[in-house]
């Protein structure tokens, strides 16, 4: 069985190539200056071109205004926009209409009640991403290397399109797939040798761990793409 895998926060040719070789479905580029994974639109465009037609490119932003989104979309022509800030349902709808691209809306999760916040976004966002709530004092809404209780996701509708993120790595992905069985997974810091520095060897190891988990005992419901 296969399901979507996004390698996020890419900044180098080697990292993009490792994601492609591993079988990623999505590659993510982060446009947020406080992040060690921040990249400019022109460089993201160059890197995204390496996977054009093979994977979907995702532009990750945090409460970006229209001018910033226009610069990103004009330069790299992403396949999807990921909104990782405090964007309202109205803002998500506005972004979709203005740029004509599908939108993935990210949410921070630490308790079951956090999942109830997606209700007004249903039918507006094309996909959801569930990440761990940032540690106190962190300036980053994601990429903090922390996880949440994946079992919370078992209560979601089986057909909901989402990606699981937050603290994933080769050592725990089997547990994450067994407990949450998400239709998609997103990894960033878990394949880095240092903050913002993707390690091709760790990317390869992660894909190997995913394949090993797939070959293990079946989860509670099938992994689907």
Image: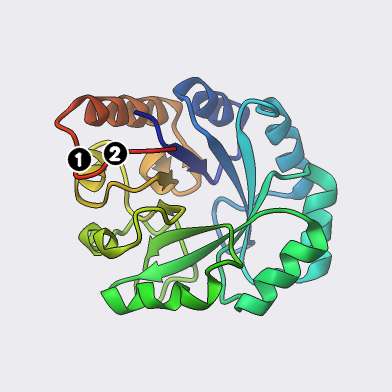
Q: Which residue is at 43% across, 71% downward?
A: 138
Horizontal side of 12 relative to 66 (left or right) equals left
Q: CA distance from mark 2 to mark 1?
A: 7 Å
Numbered circle sitting on residue 219: 1
Toward the top, the furthest residue is 21
Quadrant containing the N terminus is top left
One can see residue 178 in this view: yes
Q: Which residue is mark 2?
A: 222
Secondary element under disc 2, as helix, strand or loop, is loop
Residues 219 and 133: in front is 219
One can see residue 134 in this view: no
**Contact, CB < 8 Å: mark 2 with mark 1?**
yes
Q: Which residue is at 46% across, 61% downward?
A: 142
Q: Label 1 neighbourhood size at 10 Å, few (<14), some (14-19), many (20+)?
A: some
The mark total stands at: 2
Q: Label 2 neighbourhood size at 10 Å, few (<14), some (14-19), many (20+)?
A: some
Check the image and report above or below for 52 versus 164.
above
Q: Position of residue 12 (x, y in %)?
A: 61, 33
Q: Which residue is at 57% across, 39% downward?
A: 27
């Amino acid at each position: 069985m296969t399901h979507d895998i996004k390698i996020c926060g890419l900044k180098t040719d080697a990292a993009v190539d490792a994601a492609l070789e591993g079988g990623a479905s999505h590659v993510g580029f982060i446009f947020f200056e406080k992040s060690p994974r921040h990249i400019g639109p022109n460089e993201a465009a160059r890197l995204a071109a390496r996977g054009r037609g093979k994977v979907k490119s995702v532009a990750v932003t945090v409460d970006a205004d229209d001018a910033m989104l226009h610069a990103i979309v004009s330069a790299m022509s992403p396949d999807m926009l990921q909104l990782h800030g405090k964007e309202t349902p109205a803002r998500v709808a506005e972004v979709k209409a203005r740029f004509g691209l599908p939108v993935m809306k990210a949410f921070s999760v630490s308790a079951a009640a956090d999942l109830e916040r997606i209700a007004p976004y249903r039918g507006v966002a094309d996909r959801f991403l569930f990440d761990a709530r940032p540690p106190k004092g962190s300036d980053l809404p994601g990429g903090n290397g922390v996880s949440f209780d994946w079992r919370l996701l078992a209560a979601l509708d089986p057909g909901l399109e989402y990606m699981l993120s937050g603290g994933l790595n080769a050592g725990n992905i089997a547990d994450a797939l067994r407990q949450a069985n998400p239709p998609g997974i997103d990894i960033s810091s878990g394949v880095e040798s240092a903050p913002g520095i993707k390690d091709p060897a760790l990317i390869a190891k992660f894909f190997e761990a995913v394949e090993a988990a797939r070959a293990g005992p079946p989860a509670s419901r099938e992994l689907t793409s």
